Amino acid sequence: MVSRVIPVQPFDLVIFGGTGDLARRKILPALFRRFCAGQMDAQARVIGAARAEMDDAGYRAFARDAIIEFDVDAASDAAHLEPFLEQLSYVALDAAGETGWDALQDRLAGSERIRAFYFSVGPSLFGDLAMRLHTYGLSNPDCRIVVEKPFGRDLDSARALNKVLAEHFTEAQIYRIDHYLGKETVQNLMAIRFANTLFEPLWNSQYVDHIQITVAESGGVGTRGGYYDKSGAMRDMMQNHIMQLLCLTAMEPPAKYDPDSVRDEKLKVIRALEPVEPRDVVRGQYEATDRLAGYRNEVGSRDTTTESFVALKARIGNWRWAGTPFYLRTGKRLRARASEIAVVFKDAPHSIFGSDAGRHRNILTIRLQPNEGIEMGVTIKEPGPGGMRLVDVPLDMTFSEALGPQAADIPDAYERLIMDVIRGDQTLFMRGDEVEAAWAWTDPIIEAWEAPGSEPVLYATGSSGPDDALALIHRDGRRWREIKP
Ligand code: NAD
């Protein structure tokens, strides 16, 4: 199978925060891989812009080191790496002051290329950047800005951010990144649902017993403790990434695969979410082990109540999903690094094989990691003459096996998303009203946790989370799927 690569038009991409961690780990390696794939035009320019004093050669050296560190194949690919680096340059500037903006003006002057500005800086600088892009005449009606997460920390701050960006840019120019939407499997969820007739008739509360969405990490907060402790699992994962997975799983078929059709449907799902009952949510913190520090030690705060784990039962109040709960969970230091959406279908209404045949149900699993792919559990007869014994077997479509070696090299989400920015396709980016609606749903949960005396429960490293999270689903006569590496 040979995948088609359609080159994008020539562009100027300015990365504000071009020397930061995200630029190093994700943005520069992603651009390099698109260059290698022949998608990035030889006329395209990437301009790093950050506070550090550096010249073009210095930035190219920085980018070379980053690409080699985060893209194992790059080191041996000098034929691509050197020409790619030639397309990079650097401008030192202060997002919050006037230094350096003239130089950026000079760099972009006279260019007819598509213009994109990546805000890879802290959100407190978004307003400054938007304002200065306008003041210095760098924005034009066709330019785009790319905004990183976190987009606010509650409804009020998200509204304020939307307002500040809207002063200088239209909604069609604002690309709010949720990198989960750039994952191949997540897009495949839409293909599976809306390009096959097989699933859609069954995709409702009549046939689906419940849905589980799990994003489990085995690592702790590590060096990100300072950042993470101000955020927690709810803000860092649930409000954005898991909410997006829920939307794509639950939404009605959009009339077209275009930005507003898709985002309108996602928004309807978020607005249909019912408030979460206090008994339907569990927050946890991981404990120390003999070898590893616990959450509180890792973030350096003895009394922090920030959660490293959250599990909850979400209910969508609409015709399709009334009565089918969505169990959502995410956490750090769990048994394995594994993310999946599992659609658990109802039992057959009557078993003609008698009670000895056991209880079997179909489960469609969309695996985000590891081994991106899709698996459908079907029940068949166990081979052999020993009577009608039933057994569940997977119809497994691991992409790398089903689609050949090319599919083993699944592009990083950032590759797809940055190219979409250049193409001007917002389908996989969050709209302002979507983000606000998501905060409106999670805010009351977070506010309840801020009440005096409210504490997370502890859980063991390497476990599936706190016992209370197990009880949350057991109460309904169901069980979490095993978190498997
Ligand atoms: P970082 O602290 O590593 O880098 C920040 C960058 O901003 C640096 O290049 C710095 O020079 C620049 N900068 C800071 N103040 C500036 C100013 N006044 N003028 C000009 N440049 C200035 O941060 P990061 O980890 O790269 O994160 C950048 C953004 O991406 C943040 O909004 C973060 O929340 C988001 N994000 C990061 C990651 C990640 O993995 N690092 C993941 C998701 C989202």
Image (cartoon, helix red, strand yellow):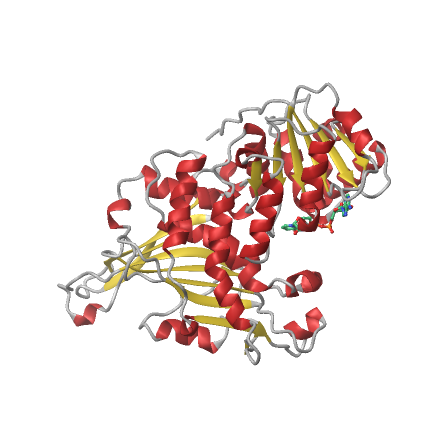
Name the spot of residue 446 as percent of width and height, x first: 53, 66
Displayed quadrant of residue 194: top left
Total numbered labels: 0
Seen from this angle, which residue lies furthest left? Answer: 352
Displayed quadrant of residue 35: top right
Front residue of this view, candidates 124 and 147: 124
Considering only vertical position in the picture, is 167 above or below 293? Answer: above
Displayed quadrant of residue 416: top right
Considering only vertical position in the picture, is 229 above or below 11? Answer: below
Residue 374 visible in the displayed image: no
The residue at 79%/33% (across/down) is: 101
In the figure, is residue 354 to the left or right of 284? left
Front residue of this view, candidates 466 and 107: 107
Residue 427 visible in the displayed image: yes
Seen from this angle, which residue lies furthest bottom? Answer: 453
Name the spot of residue 477 as percent of width and height, x first: 31, 73
The residue at 26%/53% (across/down) is: 319
Considering only vertical position in the picture, is 325 above or below 83? Answer: below
Name the spot of residue 205 as percent of width and height, x first: 26, 57
Name the spot of residue 267 as percent of width and height, x first: 42, 47
